[in-house]
Amino acid sequence: RKKNNQTISAISGANNNLSEYDKRKKQRQLETRLQTLENKLHQLQAELKSLEVILSEPAIYEENQQAKLKKHLATREKIALQLQVTEQDWLVLLERLEDVR
């Protein structure tokens, strides 16, 4: 009977180790995905800043530049939306990572 208890303990310990392994694996996966999102955020922020510089130039508002202006405004709107979605995804992922830790 003592041997059975040792076997059960060994199995339980293996399960605990497995769950700890799975936990670390999940944490690494989340950290990798979080880093990917952070990189995307930096990229989108840089693109948005670049567009803001273009849109701050008075020449873009001249009559002969209206097509470019519309294009840049549409692009700015699209990037701002992507940035908002990415920030939200980042926050959700950060919460999930905190839950795993």
Image: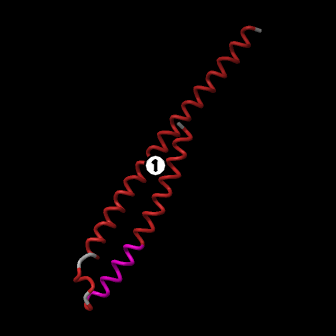
Q: Position of residue 35 (x, y in %)?
A: 41, 48
Identify the element where label 1 is drawn: helix
| Residue farthest to the top, as pictured | 2
Vertical comparison of 86 with 19: above or below: below
Query: Would you say 60 lies left or right of 93 here?
Result: left
In the rendered image, residue 75 lying in the magenta stretch gets the answer yes
Amino acid beneath label 1: Arg
Q: Position of residue 59 (x, y in %)?
A: 22, 83
Q: Which residue matches tag 1?
A: 33
| Residue farthest to the right, as pictured | 1
Vertical comparison of 34 with 82: above or below: above
Vertical comparison of 30 with 48: above or below: above
Near-viewer residue (78 or 9): 78
Residue 51: quarter of image? bottom left
Q: Position of residue 64 (x, y in %)?
A: 25, 91
Q: Position of residue 98 (x, y in %)?
A: 52, 41
Query: Would you say 59 lies left or right of 5 here?
Result: left
Residue interval drawn in magenta: 65-77
Q: Residues within 10 Å of mark 1 (few under 14, many from 20)?
A: some
- Which residue lies at the image location 43% right of the left edge and 53% below the top edge? 37
Query: Would you say 38 lies left or right of 55 here?
Result: right
